[in-house]
């Protein structure tokens, strides 16, 4: 997330690139992603783990705050906006690495990731047109 954005890009573009990078990382290193984010949070985290988590959180908050300041995102609760951004890309990443998205290749997942992020960044509704006809939502058992 920290390395994905380029400093010369605008605030919202940095946020978008961080999200794209998050999903890409999960696809290319699913085991690492899973180890980092699937274990329950321990009250006694190692110092380096806690520091890395704080740095990632501060980076995301900074991207959102800069985007709000540049009037590229609506003003509002900074933490809620950052949580929204994170949950969107995290959801795509988790569904993709667990094979729960209706795509057969990483390229299709990456295309979908851009579709979702572009729609959210632009404030556009997300429609289901163009969803593969084989896509079926999992049913609860």
Image (cartoon, helix red, strand yellow):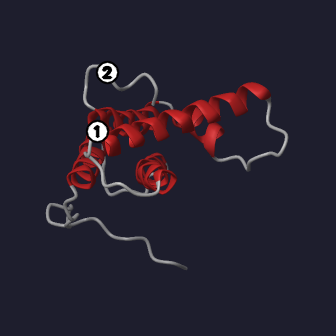
Report the residue that reaches farthest toward the bottom. 141
What residue lies at 30% left-to-right and 34% top-to-bottom? 11
Report the side of 30 relative to 116 (left or right): right
Q: Is 97 above or below relative to 77? A: above
Q: Taking 35 as reference, is 115 above or below it?
A: below
Q: Is residue 84 left or right of residue 112?
A: right
Q: Secondary structure at mark 1?
A: helix
Q: Position of residue 31 (x, y in %)?
A: 58, 35
Identify which residue is drawn at 47% across, 51% down.
78
Label 2: how many residues lie within 10 Å, few (<14), some (14-19) or many (20+)?
A: few
Quarter where residue 102 is shown: bottom left
Question: Dot 2 corresponds to which residue?
Answer: 6
Mark 1 surroundings: few (<14), some (14-19) or many (≥20) residues within 10 A: many
Q: Is residue 49 left or right of residue 123?
A: right
Which residue does the image show at 63% across and 35% down from the upper left? Answer: 53
In the image, residue 82 above or below residue 14: below
In the structure shown, which secondary structural element does the residue marked by tag 2 occupy? loop
Is 29 displayed left or right of 50 in the figure? left
Choose between 137 and 47: the one closer to the eye.
47
* Residue under numbered circle 1: 12
How far is disc 2 from disc 1 in space, using C-alphas?
11 Å
**Lower sequence index among marks 2 and 1:** 2
Q: Please state the horizontal and vertical placement of residue 105, each as a whole percent of the image.
A: 30, 42
């Amino acid at each position: 997330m920290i390395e994905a954005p380029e400093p010369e890009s605008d605030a919202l573009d940095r946020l978008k690139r961080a999200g794209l990078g998050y999903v890409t990382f999960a696809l290319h290193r699913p085991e690492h992603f899973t180890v980092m984010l699937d274990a329950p949070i321990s009250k006694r985290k190692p110092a380096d783990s806690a520091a890395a988590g704080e740095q990632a959180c501060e980076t995301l908050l900074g991207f959102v705050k800069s985007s709000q300041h540049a009037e590229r995102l609506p003003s509002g609760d900074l933490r809620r906006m950052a949580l929204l951004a994170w949950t969107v890309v995290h959801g795509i990443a988790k569904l993709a690495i667990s094979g729960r998205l209706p795509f057969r290749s990483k390229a299709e997942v990456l295309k979908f990731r851009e579709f979702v992020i572009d729609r959210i960044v632009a404030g556009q509704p997300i429609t289901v047109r163009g969803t593969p006809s084989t896509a079926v939502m999992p049913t609860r058992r």
